[in-house]
Amino acid sequence: ESLKRTPLFDLHADCGAKFAPFAGYEMPVQFPAGILKEHAQTRNAAGLFDVSHMGQVRVGGTGAAEWLESLVPGDIAGLGSGRVRYTQFTNEAGGILDDLMVTRFDDHLFLIVNAACKSADLDHMIAARPDGVTIDVLEDRALIALQGPDAAMVMARHAAGGVATMPFMSSSVIQVNGVECIVSRCGYTGEDGFEISTPVDRAIDVAEALLAESGVGPIGLGARDSLRLEAG
């Protein structure tokens, strides 16, 4: 079975990434600097992760929030516009099928689901979907995670709209290096961070802008000060 590649594959290759199969994708698992330096970089400054293999889904229509709430234990109907909720898909017995992030916007919900489960998650939603609710998989978008204590400082250099003061677990449509992105302040590293959903054809532009750090040097692990490209 042929492996898929994310829109940032060529950037990973240019940085000397070692690739391995993961959830049907050819994903970077290590860069030349090594995983200990990657770990320290994210804990002490900021790291950039390619999570484009994860699923991005738009759910809309009449009663979409109330319907999705019937599939998860989290409060979706009461979620404010621009707020993000971490929750789980459950089966009829209450067992967990997958975890996901749900953002509520004025006229739709924006979901991020895990790579290994995204086909099953989509089938689960479609099977339960009532008339009037729409489900659209956003195949035209990449996903980048900027994580670490310096993440807000880095984002402020490249993004408009007060991104550095965004509350935790909030989301907004923001220009990042001139590209319209969906930016959420969240992450799984235990540090401050942002997930940046960007059009596929501009993903490398956004990643390179974040990595370049105001002209530090060309793309390459040795040319960055407070930001590095990380495996996974």
Image: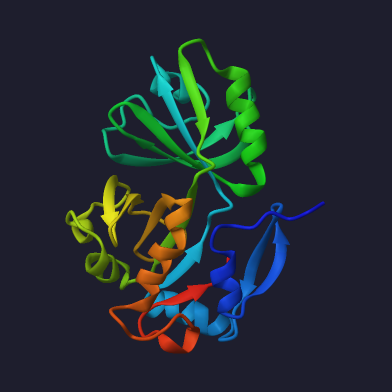
Q: Compared with residue 144, is residue 85 higher up or lower down, i.e. above or below?
A: above
Q: Quadrant of residue 160?
A: bottom left
**Quick check: 129 left or right of 158?**
right
Q: Residue furthest front?
A: 201
The image position of residue 107, as x and y in percent, is 31, 26
The residue located at (51%, 84%) in the rendering is: 37
The image position of residue 27, as x and y in percent, is 64, 63
Q: Residue furthest right?
A: 1
The image position of residue 185, as x and y in percent, is 33, 54
The residue located at (73%, 61%) in the rendering is: 21
For residue 93, say whether it is visible.
yes
For residue 231, say whether it is visible.
no
Q: Quadrant of residue 117?
A: top right
In the rendered view of the protein, which quadrant contains the C terminus? Answer: bottom right
- 142 and 169: which is toward the camera: 142
Number of labelled discs? Answer: 0
Q: Residue furthest bottom?
A: 222
